[in-house]
Image: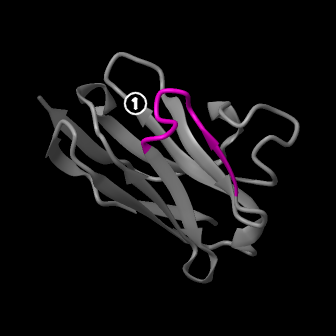
């Protein structure tokens, strides 16, 4: 059973940076999974932020974070990271790590929340003005 644990959230002023980490365990072979980040604000749907297919390191980003956020992975440690720069108050949310087997765009769009089988508990990111 795959388990995901997030860390690295916190409070930061607008323009600042944070780095989120997602530690995965229970994978048969981590490199064949698409793993990444979603976020959710109370009262709104959970939205995709960025994901990565470990075998090819193909990456996908939401338009709202393109150029500011960078997703990466350490396959040897089953870790996925999200470097968040130039943070804005609209980035305030609970950030969740998510994972699914196969390429991120295999059979569906990479951002489809229901395709992801495994989820962490979330880490809060708060950006103040």
Q: Give the range drawn in magenta.
A: 58-68
Left/right of residue 52 with respect to residue 21 in the rendered view: right
- Front in this rendered view, residue 55 or 112: 55
The reply to whether residue 118 is in sight is no
The residue drawn where x is 51% and y is 46% is: 37
Residue 11 x/y as whole percent = 15, 46
Total numbered badges shown on the rendered structure: 1
Q: Where is residue 128 in the image (x, y as percent from the top left)?
A: 13, 33
| Picture quadrant where residue 34 is located | bottom right
The C terminus appears in which quarter of the rendering?
A: top left
Residue lying at the far front of the rendered structure? 67
Type of secondary structure dominating the magenta stretch? loop
Q: Residue furthest bottom?
A: 76
Q: Seen in the image, is 90 located left or right of residue 83? A: left
Label 1: state its secondary structure: strand
| Residue at 51%, 28% in the rendered image | 47
Instruction: In the rendered view, tell whether residue 2 sits above or below residue 84.
Output: below
Q: In this view, does 61 lie above or below 20?
A: above
Q: Residue at x 27, y 44 (%)?
A: 124
107 inside magenta stretch: no
Where is 75 relative to 48, above or below? below
Residue that carries the numbered disc 1 in the rendered image: 40
């Amino acid at each position: 059973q795959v388990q995901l644990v997030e860390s690295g959230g916190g409070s930061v002023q607008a323009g600042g940076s944070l780095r989120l980490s997602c530690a995965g365990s229970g994978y048969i072979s981590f490199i064949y999974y698409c793993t990444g980040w979603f976020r959710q604000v109370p009262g709104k749907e959970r939205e995709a932020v960025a994901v990565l297919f470990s075998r090819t390191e193909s990456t996908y980003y939401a338009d709202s974070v393109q150029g500011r956020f960078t997703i990466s992975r350490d396959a040897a440690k089953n870790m996925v990271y999200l470097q968040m720069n130039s943070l804005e108050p609209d980035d305030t949310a609970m950030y969740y790590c998510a994972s699914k087997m196969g390429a991120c765009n295999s059979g569906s769009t990479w951002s489809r929340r229901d395709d992801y089988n495994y989820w962490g508990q979330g880490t809060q990111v708060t950006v103040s003005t």
